[in-house]
Image (tube, helix red, strand yellow):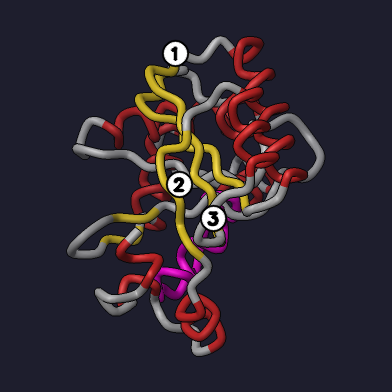
């Protein structure tokens, strides 16, 4: 999700999407004597934002016209090599399954599906859950996160959760701190310990 860096208080200067677009504009612009794969992986390392607690790689904009197969395959390979260096790899998707469907390994330990407290959002999760079988992903666990929830979930909402068949892993209450931090462009990592969202 391109907004994740902002919510963590980071300034994003370049993304994987930028690398892909620039390469597609000039595929022959690789330095003399350097392999294309090595060159793209070098550029990928340059856009990796390293922090004490985590590293962040921002995918960025969608693809333009033309065939991106070769570039996407290299990026997938790079992501899978990168994965070996970390205890945890979190992929924060935009809404939908497009990015997951491109993961070449197809391995997912925990798939968290997020909805706000609305039947419409919950039904969108249900549709995604139904699509999972077609994507040939190896998913060990699936769970639901209910965001901006009231103190008590209504029976119609709980009935829909049961119909979808994905257990609720976490309920995050509505928290005025989130809006305040967003308006002030502050990192959510700086939320106070007594914040309702942090405690949840």
x and y, in percent, of residue 144 in the image: 50, 37
What residue does disc 1 label?
A: 138
| Mark 2: secondary structure | loop
x and y, in percent, of residue 51 in the image: 24, 64
Is residue 172 left or right of 17 when viewed as pictured? Answer: left
Query: In this view of the protein, which residue sits in the foreground, 40 or 132?
Result: 132
Res 99 → quadrant:
top right
Up/down of 121 relative to 84, above or below: below
Instruction: Farthest residue to the right: give it.
Output: 65
Stretch of the chain drawn in magenta: 1-18
Looking at the rendered image, the disc whose residue lies closer to the viewer, 1 or 2, is 1
Looking at the rendered image, the disc whose residue lies closer to the viewer, 3 or 2, is 3
Tell me the tag on residue 147: 3
What residue does disc 2 label?
A: 31
x and y, in percent, of residue 65 in the image: 81, 40
Q: Main secondary structure of the magenta part?
A: loop
Query: What's the CA distance linking mark 3 and mark 2?
Result: 48 Å
Query: What's the CA distance linking mark 1 and mark 2?
Result: 39 Å
Identified at 20% across, 60% down, the residue is 53
Q: Is residue 11 on the magenta stretch?
A: yes
Identified at 43% across, 32% down, the residue is 37
| Mark 3: secondary structure | strand
Q: What is the crowding at mark 1: few (fewer than 14 residues within 10 Å), some, or many (at least 20)?
A: some
Identified at 70% across, 39% down, the residue is 156
Q: What is the crowding at mark 3: few (fewer than 14 residues within 10 Å), some, or many (at least 20)?
A: some
Residues at badges 1 and 2 in contact (C-beta under 8 Å)? no
Instruction: Farthest residue to the bottom: give it.
Output: 184
Res 124 → quadrant:
top right
Is residue 43 left or right of 194 when viewed as pictured? Answer: right
Identified at 65% across, 31% down, the residue is 159
């Amino acid at each position: 999700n391109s907004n994740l860096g902002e919510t963590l208080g980071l300034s994003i200067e370049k993304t994987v999407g930028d690398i892909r677009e620039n390469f597609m504009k000039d595929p022959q612009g690789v330095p003399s004597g350097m392999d294309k794969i090595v060159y793209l992986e070098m550029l990928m390392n340059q856009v990796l934002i390293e922090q004490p607690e985590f590293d962040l790689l921002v995918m960025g904009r969608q693809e333009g016209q033309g065939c991106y197969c070769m570039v996407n395959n290299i990026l997938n390979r790079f992501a899978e090599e990168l994965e070996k260096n970390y205890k945890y790899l979190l992929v924060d998707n935009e809404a939908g399954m497009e990015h997951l469907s491109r993961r070449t390994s197809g391995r997912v330990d925990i798939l968290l599906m997020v909805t706000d407290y609305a039947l419409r959002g919950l039904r969108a999760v249900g549709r995604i859950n139904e699509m999972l079988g077609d994507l040939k992903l190896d998913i060990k666990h699936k769970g639901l996160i209910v965001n901006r929830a009231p103190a008590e979930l209504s029976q119609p909402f709980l009935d829909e959760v049961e119909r979808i068949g994905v257990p609720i892993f976490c309920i995050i209450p509505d928290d005025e701190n989130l809006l305040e931090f967003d308006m002030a462009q502050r990192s959510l990592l700086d939320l106070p310990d007594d914040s309702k969202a942090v405690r949840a």
